[in-house]
Image (cartoon, helix red, strand yellow):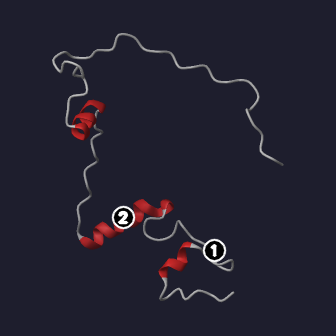
Amino acid sequence: MSQPNLATDPKDLLIVPKSFMRIRHYGLLANRHRAEHLDACRAALDAPTPAPAEPETVEAFLSRVLGTDANRCPHCGQGRLRPVSLLPPLPRATGPPLFRWAA
């Protein structure tokens, strides 16, 4: 089997040859030093540190994505839905697995 020409054919990088090892966590955004590298990049570019994002509530997210109020009655559109009771979680299965992998 001939070696792929990595300089001219980037689609060959999807399947790495046996003699190669894929390195996924490498570079500026590698998880171990991400904060240090991003601080150095911001300092080099004279960019300010972004403000932390405020978490969005579920109601705000649904109204932004769906374009409607999620608490409105879907039938009449007038009334407001309110929780009446919470359902308890289903019990976990304690029996044997339904199938086994072939050994």
Residue 84 in the image, given as x and y percentages of width and height:
35, 10
The residue sitting at the right extreme is 103
From the viewer's perspective, is residue 32 above or below residue 80?
A: below
In the picture, the quarter occupied by the N terminus is: bottom right
Q: Amino acid at mark 1?
A: Met
Residue 54 in the image, given as x and y percentages of width and height:
27, 41
- Residue 42 left/right relative to 5: left
Residue 9 in the image, given as x and y percentages of width and height:
49, 84
Cα separation between marks 1 and 2:
26 Å
Residue nearest the observer in this picture, 65 or 41: 65
Residue 50 in the image, given as x and y percentages of width and height:
26, 55
> Residue at coordinates 30% horizontally, 32% vertically from top-left?
58
Q: How many marks?
A: 2
From the viewer's perspective, is residue 87 above or below residue 56?
A: above
- Residue 23 left/right relative to 43: right
> Residue at coordinates 63% horizontally, 74% vertically from top-left?
21
Foreground mark, 1 or 2, reads: 1
Q: Residues within 10 Å of mark 2 (few under 14, many from 20)?
A: some
Q: Which residue is mark 1?
A: 21
Q: Amino acid at mark 2?
A: Leu
Quarter where residue 17 is shown: bottom right
Q: Which residue is mark 2?
A: 38
Q: Residues within 10 Å of mark 1 (few under 14, many from 20)?
A: few
The residue sitting at the front extreme is 75
From the viewer's perspective, is residue 61 above or below residue 9?
A: above
- Residue 2 left/right relative to 96: left
- Residue 80 left/right relative to 88: left
Q: Under tag 1, what secondary structure?
A: loop
> Residue at coordinates 28% horizontally, 37% vertically from top-left?
56
